[in-house]
Amino acid sequence: MSLKEYALLDATDLARLVRHREITASELVEAAIAHLERAEPRLSGMAEWALDLARAEAAGPPRQGPFAGVPFLLKDNMHVAAGIPYHNGSRIWRGRIASGDSELVRRFRAAGLILLGSTKVPELSLTPVTEPRDFGRVHNPWALHHTAGGSSGGSAAHVAARSVPMAHATDGGGSIRIPASCCGLFGLKPTRGRTPNGPFMGEAWHGLAVGHAVTRSVRDSAALLDAIAGADTGAPYGLAPPALSFTEAAARPPGRLRIAFSAVAPTGAAVHTECRIAVELAAKLCEDLGHDVEAAAPPLPARYFSWFMTVFLAAVAQEFAIAEEATGVRARRTEVEDTTWLCRQLGRALSAETLSIALEKLHRASRPIGVFFDRFDVLLTPTLALPPVTHGALRPVGVEAALQSLMARFGIGGLLRYGPLLDHAAERTFAFMPFTPIWNVTGQPAANLPLHRTPDGLPVGVQAVGRFGEETTLLSFAAQLEQAHPWTGQIPPGCT
């Protein structure tokens, strides 16, 4: 198989070739490895390589499952694979090697996928750009000096560059949808509890985080979700399976939907013209397809993002504690970036009462959002408030960077004195991603639709949000838009 042939096919088509014996799993894996090794020097998206394991697996007995023989990459976050060192973008995990696969990875393998390695994330997967100090930034294949997004940046970069047809991704505040938007991919965050997080994680970010994948086609996302859906044993929550499989949903028209759209950021942040245009064009496309479309958005309390930050900071402190427990080594300030250490210190300073109240406020705020979706089937927003930013655009600089370094060195007193600096850092981050975290809190499914481009060719995504538990509606709707406005044939320069 030539690199050009390989680049043009999605996972469903590649699996069909293996199933019909038009190509062997070994030949397919070799094509993927050639593409991956060609792309990696430009993208810098890999955390760990597992090529010998992949070759041995491909050469073994014929595999079963809907994606038998299809090459795949694992995001270096939340889920672990036996034999592949785990970092989560940070030295505090010390390359821990798990003795067995997490449940989601076991299901990936049962679906027939062959892991070629793991992909880079920002430190502890905390930021919407993938620029870990100790592992190196990931480049966007559409423009190398721009971000590939985060935290699933390495996965998105290599899927967009055609190294693999799809790759694992996780989402605790937008980490599937953000890099999908930056790299021009379809990225579905499933409903909370739809896919397993265990057994090595109990809940993941207080219920905010869920795993799935970034893909080029809607049908790949749907078929993969069919293969991995369902709670693992002992999970804190789960969902009944849909009456219609996700694959079947993606293959049938959605019917006439009630669609709301809004390009107004819930934080009040400015929204780039191209991001507004993307939503307006998507709304017009929906009208042309016969849907009922209305400008509307759900209500949000003024302090919503403050409560979200409280939960986020507590999750950062939790990550340090879990890493220290797993490795038996106490984390040191010099091992992590200053902002990461400050977030950990702030998280440790929170009281149980403060965290509990923030969670309660967020869950109360979800009720009127749910009422909004009694009126509408789908909400369209920009995925991001900006096109892919250049590298370093979200990092602190100058006085802010210097003061954060001092705060990290001198501890909690500095945090209390200079707390507004962290508020400024949070505002800078949410100015990029004000539209995504809400749906991690409500648990609703949300997807990036790669429907637009800036005049200079950078991808700009549209976010589609559905009711809790109704991925079938989103997948059917997304497949309709994919057919009306095809995106899978768009390939970054130099990637075939």
Image: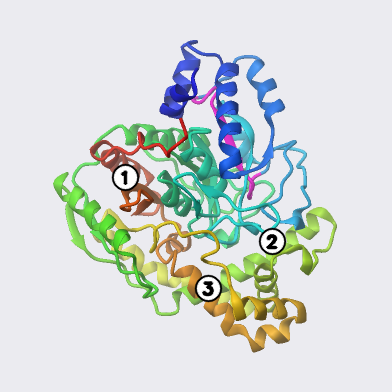
Q: How many badges with numbers are in the image?
A: 3
- SS majority, magenta: loop
Identify the secondary structure beneath mark 2. Answer: helix
Q: Residue at x 38, y 45 (%)?
A: 471
Extreme-bottom residue of the structure: 417
Instruction: Look at the numbered discs 2 and 1 and tell me whether their residues touch, using CB distance below 8 Å.
Output: no
Quarter holding residue 352: bottom right
Foreground pick, 399 / 61? 399
How far across and down, in percent of the image, does residue 28 sit?
55, 20
Q: Is residue 455 left or right of residue 316?
A: left
Amino acid type, callout 3:
Ala
- Residue 473: give its label: 1
Q: Which residue is mark 3?
A: 426
Residue 483 as seen in the image, left or right of residue 492 = left
Circles 3, 2 touching at the beta carbon (< 8 Å): no
Side (left or right) of 476 relative to 429? left
State the extent of the magenta-drawn residues as a range: 66-79
Q: Is residue 336 above or below residue 267?
A: above
Mark toward the start of the polypeptide (1 vs 3): 3
**Which mark, by number, is residue 319?**
2
Hey, what amino acid is under mark 2? Glu
Spot occupied by residue 282 in the image (x, y as percentages of width and height): 24, 52
